[in-house]
Image: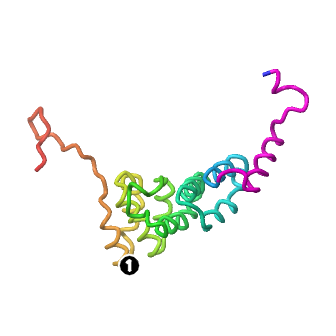
Amino acid sequence: MAESLAAGATRGADVRDKTLELVRSGAIRPEHRPALLRRFLGGKAEPELLAMLAGDFSPKTIRSVIIEVQNLGKAEHMAAVLARCEEQGWLGDARRMPWLSGRLLDEHIKTATKGELVRAVAAVKARPALAKLTAKAVKQRLADQDPDVRELLAQVKLEEDPVAPEAPGSAEPAVQP
């Protein structure tokens, strides 16, 4: 610890500046850049992350960009995230699709256009755990006037409580057929 406090030690803004210099110069591997950008720039990394999302990178790098864009916590970026997943061919494949934030996807479904909604539903269908997290927005959108939107959302299996209610006068739960 004494070495880290010695005169001339690098810390604070110096570490941030040096790291950002390395990231921007290309000295850091592409798949590590998004996490470093977000960690050191926070919300100010948004333009760079969105540029990387649209860029031509390896699948590993694109996955890390998708995760870091979601870590910004802005639902308005979910359309771009889902579009990129679709471009990569990951959208319907639960094994290859990167992590998606249920909270952000829920917010996105509330305001998504028809094309964006198709992608969101494909993501929810591929990952059943997302159905629980997006159930409220899906139920809200089922009241939509557009029959195509209602038909699309009807494909999402909303998770209900899997435990059957007890039969009256019985100590054991009722058997589901």
Task: Label 1, secondary structure: give it.
Answer: loop
Quarter-wise, where is residue 4 in the image?
top right
Magenta part of the chain: 2-29
Q: Residue at x 31, y 73 (%)?
A: 151
Asked if residue 89 lies in the magenta stretch, the reply is no
Q: Residue at x 37, y 74 (%)?
A: 149
Q: Residue at x 34, y 71 (%)?
A: 152
Q: Residue 48: percent from the left, percent from the top?
A: 69, 61
Q: Is residue 40 above or below residue 138?
A: above
Q: Residue 42: percent from the left, percent from the top?
A: 70, 50
Q: Residue 84: percent from the left, percent from the top?
A: 52, 67
Residue 172 falls left or right of residue 4:
left
Q: Nearer the viewer, residue 22 or 35?
A: 22
Count of all numbered marks drawn on residues in the image: 1
Q: Residue 103: percent from the left, percent from the top?
A: 49, 53
Asked if residue 8 lies in the magenta stretch, the reply is yes
Q: Residue at x 69, y 50 (%)?
A: 28
Q: How is the image coloured?
A: rainbow
Q: Is residue 99 above or below residue 85?
A: above
Can residue 111 be seen by looking at this rendering? no
Residue located beneath label 1 in the image: 146
Q: Is residue 61 above or below residue 116?
A: above
Amino acid carrying label 1: it is Asp
Residue 165 falls left or right of residue 67:
left
Give the crowd class for mark 1: few <14, some 14-19, many >=20 residues within 10 Å.
few
